[in-house]
Image (cartoon, rainbow, N blue to C red):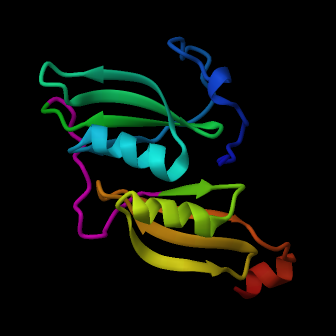
Amino acid sequence: MVVQAVRRRTATQMPEKNMKNAEYMIPMLVCRDGAGEIEFCRLAFGAIELSRRSDDDGSVVHATLAIGGSLVMIHGEVDTLLSQSPRVDGSSPVVIYAYVQEQVDAVIDRAIAAGACIQTPVMDLPWGDRMGRIMDPAGHVWNVANRAAETSAKDTHAA
């Protein structure tokens, strides 16, 4: 699976430790169970783990994943980080829009098998995307979409 980013990069082209010249945004997902979130991303999206720092008890403090040409950071809840894991009630102020090249239905099926729940079933949308919304086991919300049809500006505005 390939997730499209503004600048397409592969995992081998990702910067390893030198972020000095970074020109992109990287979402950082705060999780109660960082290892579980890493496994979910691996199973659902084919994520490749690029780095991981663990606490003395083995829990994930921080990890960086490559999903297609994009990076995602996973961060465990820690007292010094004011951000907290999302509530697992389906609400989230942030939605990750994962634009994929493979069939959306297949990605959603893998996500469900890895523990996600459906928030919006997969459907074709008026602006040409095929999309479904899931909530992962950690409570993060993902729109998984790809381009299903070309539409005109008139079609898009009518939606």
Residue at (60, 70) in percent of width and height: 105
- Residue range highlighted in magenta: 80-95
For the C terminus, the quadrant is bottom right
Left or right of 134 in this view: 150? right
Residue at (75, 82) in percent of width and height: 157
Q: From what the image shows, is residue 118 above or below residue 141?
A: below
Q: From what the image shows, is residue 149 above or below residue 85?
A: below
Residue at (26, 55) in percent of width and height: 86
Instruction: Please provide percent x and percent y for residue 51.
Output: 42, 22
* Name of the residue lying farthest toward the front: 113
Residue at (49, 60) in percent of width and height: 110
Left or right of 31 in this view: 13? right
Q: From what the image shows, is residue 42 above or below residue 144?
A: above
Residue closer to the observer: 121 or 78 = 121
Instruction: Please provide percent x and percent y for residue 28.
Output: 40, 39
Q: How many marks?
A: 0
Q: Is residue 94 magenta?
A: yes
Left or right of 44 in this view: 103? right
Residue closer to the observer: 46 or 87 = 46
Instruction: Please provide percent x and percent y for residue 6.
Output: 71, 42
Which quadrant of the figure has residue 36? Answer: top left
Secondary structure character of the magenta stretch overall: loop
Q: Is residue 56 magenta?
A: no
Which quadrant of the figure has residue 116? Answer: bottom left
Instruction: Please provide percent x and percent y for residue 22.
Output: 60, 23
